[in-house]
Amino acid sequence: MSAEPKIYQPEMECMDVEERRKLQGERLRETVKHEYENVPFYRERMDAKGVKPEDIQTVDDIVKLPFMQKTDLRDTFPFGLFAVPNEEIVRIQGSSGTTGKPIVSGYTENDVKIWSEMVARAMASIGADKEDIVQVCYGYGLFTGGLGAHQGATEVGAMVIPMSSGNTQRQIMMMQELGTTVLCCTPSYATYLGEAIHDAGLVPKKDIKLRAGLFGAEPWTEAMRQKIEELLGIDARDIYGLTEIAGPGVAFECFAKNGAHINEDHVIAEIIDPVTEEQLPYGTAGELVFTTITKKGMPMLRYRTHDICTLYAGKCECGRTTVRMGRITGRTDDMIVVRGVNVFPSQIETVLVKTAGVAPHYQLIVDRVNSSDTLEVKVEMTEEVFALTDSLGEMQRLQKYIKDQIKSVVGISTKVTIVAPKSLPRSEGKAKRVFDNRKM
Ligand code: DLL
């Protein structure tokens, strides 16, 4: 079995930096023209800022362009940002919006191919090829994790087991019986699987043949990497991405593990000050902004990810010349990632506001129990209902109703706790609603 790290497209990944900047400039110019001509929403944005496609000639001109945000996807839902006729779109993927509605991205056939190649680069970097058996335990569906990892593994010729998420015992059984060598899932699930494997009395490297894994979709730390590597006896690598830009594979770690290489022939990465929106130099922490430069179905120009990190330039010992991003250290908005699912407090608030009997005072408590994330929603009942409700059954009915509503909007199970009126602390300023007690 080959486990030698490989560079999938060296002509792009190891390209001379100046040459790449020239290529980025050309691709940016084309993308801006395509967007201006085909997406009225963005044309109006550019017109309002007084920018014309001719003003964009090199990568440095990117600062003249207006930003895009998640709310733009919501406001133009579903097809308003498509830059080609719907007949040319062959795939829709999606993720959480800031309210109940998901946001969607459309891909042309070539967009899917490019995305697959981006993930294939990550697969090659862990030495995955046709000798490998790749178990994908990211969810399949609108979420880009399952299909994204699947396509990348197929691209390098591996045998793919499309398990999707959940059903841990079955995951372990398949892993053991089929001899899985590469694991793709969230880092928290990798830890959970590792513990379940130990609990089942199985020995990594003997009963389980795993040798490497690509983990992402949620923030994780070096300490968590060590834990996963010890538990599963593998090489654990970070993979980063977001639906709006492509999905997993926007960036990935090489064996040097000193930041994730950004696929700069397909995207331009910037770091900005989230308040002034000024571009910041490499080496400074700030908000990550991406511009796609090869996507045709739904290009994104200066998309504000709200992820906080630092970019690093300079050749890496692996030979790649692409800019690397450090770990995501936080968000500039209130999004939290729970079991790999993006959750906005506003989504939960929307459910609570619509529910009779509870007041819109709530707290979200995130924790990690046995390596799995938990989310508790504490909500106050109204005075009227408090005065009338004395039966436990009534309270349980309300709890279940809220839990089911949140599940249908956000897609994850929560624990709902109903508390007495006026018992949650009030704040005079910005309410602190999220308490993240996870220690990674
Ligand atoms: O989470 C895509 C993905 C799937 C990446 C599988 C890696 C593996 P979204 O659902 O759109 O897409 O969520 C994107 O998740 O803005 C980050 O906040 C967070 N995120 C994704 N990867 C990482 C990572 C997928 N490696 C949002 N480290 C992003 C930290 C990550 N956060």
Image (cartoon, grey):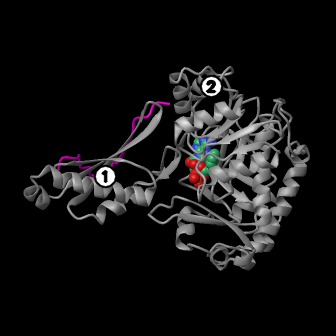
Three-letter code for the amino acid on which mark 1 is drawn: Gly
Whether residue 44 can be seen here = yes
The image shows residue 440 at horizontal and vertical percentages of 50, 30
Q: Which residues are magenta?
A: 421-440
Residue 412, horizontal then vertical, whole percent: 44, 51
Q: Gap in Å between the C-alphas at discs 2 and 1?
A: 46 Å
The answer to whether 335 is drawn above or below residue 184 in the figure is below
| Label 2 beta carbon less than 8 Å to ligand 1 | no
The stretch drawn in magenta includes residue 265: no
Q: Residue 220 location, x and y as percent? A: 56, 35
The residue located at (84%, 30%) in the rendering is 2
- Secondary structure under tag 1 reads loop
Q: Which quarter of the figure has residue 122? A: top right
Quarter of the picture containing the N terminus is top right
Q: Is residue 8 left or right of residue 83?
A: right
Would you name the residue on which mark 2 appears? 232
Give the residue pinned by disc 1.
429
Residue drawn 76% across and 63% down? 295
Side of 192 where 130 appears, left or right: right
The amino acid on which the numbered mark 2 sits, given as a three-letter code, is Leu
Indicate whether 33 appears above or below 290.
Answer: below
Of pointers 2 and 1, the one earlier in the residue sequence: 2
Q: Is residue 421 visible?
A: no
Neighbor class of circle 1 (other Cα within 10 Å; few <14, some 14-19, many 20+) is: few
Taking the spot 72% from the left edge, 32% from the top edge, the residue there is 181
Q: Please report contact status of discs 2 and 1: CB closer than 8 Å, yes or no.
A: no
Residue 424 on the magenta segment: yes
Number of the front mark, 2 or 1 = 2
